Image (tube, rainbow, N blue to C red):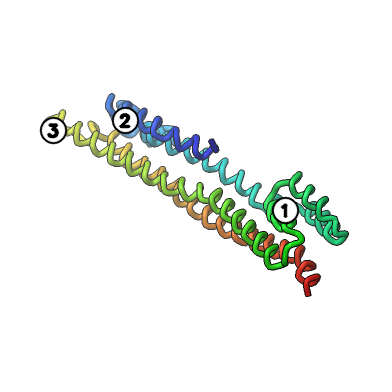
């Protein structure tokens, strides 16, 4: 199970904890002073309740995911220059089996696509071209699926914030009911804090992550096109041989 899937599986647990904490008293985290939570960032986090903390945990996870994708989506990682040069040399020497073995021993975007074409050497060029083109499309889909986790988290964060907002408003109305309509603002300040802060935290995660997702998606597409051109150039001698 991948790390994004494992994190997604934890979300119901975190939400269940938030519901349990809310049932015990929504404003407990704020303290007796209704303005105490405004004095520090940690106060904001505590005031947001367990759902706010869940969003904070999600933001840390997404940050790590962005760093990991920034590293793995580089062209140098998907198509190592040293591997490319060695493949060129082997193909120029018509050492197709050695080139195939090299690809299998160094799996990456470039190696997987080239290996698909080399496995059909001896067939008409049109067949080889179709095979490595389809392999390139499959690898591109994998990249987009990987980047797609950012979009998923960008959508989950504001929904978690909205859930916290609904929870906070429910708690605020419950406080009014308990006070028989005579509640002062201080009585449900903590509940309102949960309602607003979780929305704030959800948007603070969703907005930058959405921007990064678009950037990463475009980068994945650009790199895939560039590698596709490189692979086509590697197999160009097979077209010329046919001619």
Residue matched to label 1: 115
One can see residue 69 in this view? yes
Q: Nearer the N terminus, badge 2 or badge 3?
A: 2
Q: Residue furthest bottom?
A: 243
Helix, strand or loop at label 3? It is loop
| Camera-side residue of 33 and 218 | 218
Is 120 on the left-hand or right-hand side of 46? right
Residue 164, image x and y in percent? Answer: 33, 39
Residue 64, image x and y in percent? Answer: 57, 41
Is 3 on the left-hand or right-hand side of 186? right
Distance of mark 3 from mark 1, alpha carbons?
A: 75 Å
Mark toward the viewer: 3 or 1: 1
Q: Is residue 63 above or below residue 136?
A: above
Q: Where is residue 189, by image quadrant?
A: top left
Q: What residue lies at 24% left-to-right and 34% top-to-bottom?
A: 171
Q: Are marks 2 and 1 in contact (CB under 8 Å)?
A: no
| Camera-side residue of 132 and 37 | 132
Residue matched to label 3: 182
Residue matched to label 2: 19
Q: Counting other residues with Cα less than 10 Å from the Cα at mark 3, is it few (<14), some (14-19), or many (20 or more)?
A: few
């Amino acid at each position: 199970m991948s790390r994004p899937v494992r994190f997604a599986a934890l979300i119901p647990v975190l939400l269940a904890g938030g519901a349990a904490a809310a049932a015990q008293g929504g404003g407990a985290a704020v303290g007796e002073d209704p303005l105490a939570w405004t004095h520090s960032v940690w106060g904001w986090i505590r005031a947001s309740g367990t759902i706010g903390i869940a969003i904070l945990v999600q933001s840390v996870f997404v940050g790590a995911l962005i760093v990991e994708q920034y590293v793995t989506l580089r062209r140098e990682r998907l198509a190592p220059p040293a591997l490319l040069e060695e493949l060129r040399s082997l193909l120029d020497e018509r050492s197709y089996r050695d080139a195939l073995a090299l690809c299998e021993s160094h799996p990456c975007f470039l190696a997987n696509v080239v290996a698909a074409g080399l496995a059909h050497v001896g067939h008409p060029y049109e067949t080889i071209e179709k095979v490595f083109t389809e392999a390139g499309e499959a690898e591109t889909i994998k990249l987009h699926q990987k980047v797609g986790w950012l979009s998923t988290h960008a959508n989950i964060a504001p929904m978690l914030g909205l859930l916290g907002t609904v929870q906070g408003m429910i708690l605020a109305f419950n406080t009014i009911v308990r006070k028989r309509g005579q509640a002062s603002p201080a009585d449900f300040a903590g509940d309102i804090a949960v309602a607003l802060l979780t929305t704030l935290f959800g948007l603070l995660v969703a907005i930058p992550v959405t921007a990064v997702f678009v950037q990463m998606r475009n980068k994945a597409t650009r790199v895939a096109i560039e590698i596709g051109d490189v692979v086509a150039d590697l197999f160009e001698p097979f077209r010329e041989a046919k001619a």
